[in-house]
Image (spheres, rainbow, N blue to C red):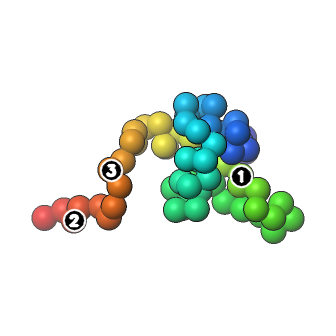
Amino acid sequence: HVTFTVTEAAAELDRDTSRIRQLCRKGRLGYTMPKFGQAWIITLEEITKFKANGPQSPGPKAKKK
């Protein structure tokens, strides 16, 4: 698996590192591993999916009818 740090993911997604950390905390990107403490690990698959989905509006997703 190819993985990225927060800084690498920020460069790849053209976002600020604080925004990447926020997305990680919200569960949209990354995961943590106990031995790394608070370091986020972001996979290439997550980066690809994020790019494909594009920016999402804030708040809960609208329910489909």
Does dot 1 land on a helix, a strand or a loop? strand
Question: Front-most of 62 and 15?
Answer: 15
Q: Amino acid at mark 3?
A: Ser
> Residue farthest to the left?
65
Please tell me the numbered disc located at residue 41. 1
Circle nearer the viewer, 1 or 3: 3
Q: Which residue is mark 2?
A: 63
Label 1 or label 3, whichever comes before in sequence order: 1
Q: Are marks 2 and 1 in contact (CB under 8 Å)?
A: no
Is 4 situated above or below 39?
Answer: above
Q: Are marks 1 and 3 in contact (CB under 8 Å)?
A: no
Q: Amino acid at mark 2?
A: Lys
Question: Front-most of 50 and 45?
Answer: 50
**Disc 1 and disc 3: Cα gap in Å?**
24 Å
Query: Whole-percent x and y of residue 58?
Result: 35, 55
Q: Which residue is mark 3?
A: 57
Specify few, some or many for label 2: CA neighbours under 10 Å numbering under 14, 14-19, or 20 or more. Answer: few
Q: Amino acid at mark 1?
A: Ile
Does dot 2 land on a helix, a strand or a loop? loop
Q: Name the residue rendered at 63%, 43% in the picture.
A: 17
